[in-house]
Image (cartoon, rainbow, N blue to C red):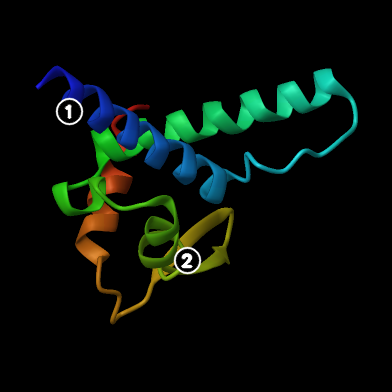
């Protein structure tokens, strides 16, 4: 049983690495400077961890298991457009948006942090 647990955890780690690589471009090296590349990688991994914490604490159960690519496609990119009114910027959500209630709950959860 211990051998299975070890390899199962290892397989999960490979999925986390793949998610960070494809979702946050951790496989791209922006510069030839080692220190600059190290800082870039640390910032990308920090962003990945923030994203995972956001999903953990502010998303409903079906959204928590989404990959970064699916989350962006279904939640972020399909929401709507920003409209600027007098001293106020608003987000108009599309009428036929599938995850409208889920998105509003995420926004309310973030607003409670303030």
Relative placement, left or right, of 87 versus 11 is right
Q: Secondary structure at mark 2?
A: loop
Q: Which residue is mark 2?
A: 77
69 and 5: which is toward the camera: 5
Image: 52 above or below 97: above
Residue 29 in percent (x, y) is at: 77, 38
Determine which of the numbered discs, if any, sits on residue 113 in the image.
none
Q: Residue at coordinates 66% horizontally, 29% vertically from top-left?
A: 41
| Comes first in the chain, label 2 or label 1 | 1
Estimate the spatial distance between the alpha carbons at disc 2 and disc 1, rounded to whole Å: 39 Å
Q: Residue at coordinates 81% horizontally, 39% vertically from top-left?
A: 30
Q: Residue at coordinates 25% horizontally, 22% vertically from top-left?
A: 6
The quarter of the rendered structure image containing the C terminus is top left
Image: 101 above or below 64: below
Determine which of the numbered discs, if any, sits on residue 4 in the image.
1
The quarter of the rendered structure image containing the N terminus is top left
Residue 25 in percent (x, y) is at: 63, 45
Q: Residue at coordinates 43% horizontally, 66% vertically from top-left?
A: 73
* Image marks 2 and 1: residues in contact by CB distance under 8 Å: no
């Amino acid at each position: 049983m211990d051998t299975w647990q070890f390899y199962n955890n290892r397989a999960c780690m490979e999925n986390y690495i793949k998610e960070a690589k494809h979702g946050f471009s951790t496989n791209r090296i922006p510069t030839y400077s080692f220190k600059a590349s190290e800082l870039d990688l640390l910032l990308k991994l920090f962003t990945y961890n923030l994203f995972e914490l956001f999903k953990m604490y502010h998303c409903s159960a079906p959204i928590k298991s989404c990959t970064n690519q699916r989350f962006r496609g279904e939640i972020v990119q399909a929401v709507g457009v920003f409209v600027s009114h007098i001293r106020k910027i608003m987000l108009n959500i599309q009428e036929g948006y599938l995850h409208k209630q889920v998105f509003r709950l995420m926004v309310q959860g973030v607003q409670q942090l303030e």
